[in-house]
Amino acid sequence: MNLKNDLILRAAKGENIERTPVWLMRQAGRILPQYRKIRNSLSGFKELVETPQLAAEVTIQPVDILEVDAAIIFSDILVVPQAMGLKYEMVENKGPYFPKTILNQK
């Protein structure tokens, strides 16, 4: 496989590189009109997190626009408790709500 942009990978391996790589966390894209357009077309934040194609698209948007070397994959920390069986609802303008918590699973 021949990668087009492997600067960050070569840096992580400790190889000699021509410049310091630049990367972004996903929050860097929240202000982008392209992100807002996708986000506003969905039923909510969970749909964005749970749809791989959309998560990949919003991950790569700031990379393409700002021409940086890498980005952290778009996701949310709440995928962890959900994977452990704790369902949650994302309440707009408020945040996550867990109808059942570990303490009241009975």
Image (cartoon, rainbow, N blue to C red):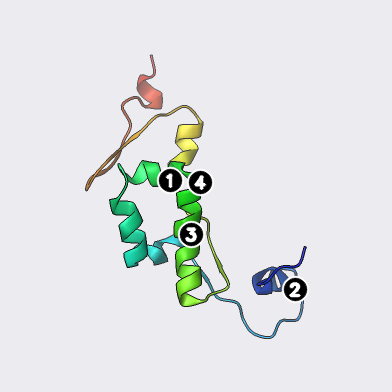
Q: Which mark is residue 68?
A: none
Q: Mark 3 or mark 2: which comes first in sequence? A: 2
Secondary structure, mark 4, is helix
Q: Quadrant of residue 10?
A: bottom right
Residue 31 visible in image: no
Label 3: which residue?
Answer: 59
Identify which residue is drawn at 39% across, 65% down.
29
Whether pointer 2 and pointer 1 mark residues with C-beta atoms closer than 8 Å, the reply is no
Q: Earlier in the sequence, mark 3 or mark 4?
A: 4
Give the distance between the C-alpha atoms of the residues marked 2 and 1, in whole angstroms.
33 Å
Q: Give the CA separation, mark 4 to mark 1.
A: 7 Å
Question: Mark 4 against mark 1, which lies toward the viewer?
Answer: 4
Residues at marks 1 and 3, CA–CA distance in whole angstroms: 11 Å
Q: CA distance from mark 4 to mark 2?
A: 31 Å
Mark closer to the observer (2, 1): 1
- At label 4, counting other C-alpha atoms closer than 10 Å, the crowd grade (few under 14, some 14-19, many 20 or more) is few
Which part of the image, by quadrant, shows the N terminus? bottom right
Amino acid type assigned to the residue bearing label 4 in the image:
Pro
Q: Residues within 10 Å of mark 2 (few under 14, many from 20)?
A: few
Say which mark, if any, is on residue 52. Answer: 4
Residue, x 53% and y 60% (percent of image)? 72
Q: Is residue 3 at all visible to an observer of this figure?
A: yes
Along the viewing direction, whichever of 65 and 22 lies nearer the viewer: 65
Q: What percent of the width, then of the height, locates residue 2?
A: 76, 67
Q: What amino acid is at disc 3?
A: Thr
Q: What numbered label is drawn on residue 49?
A: 1
Q: Amino acid at mark 1?
A: Val
Q: Position of residue 39 (x, y in %)?
A: 33, 53
* Residue under numbered circle 2: 14
Residue at point 44% right, 58% down? Answer: 58
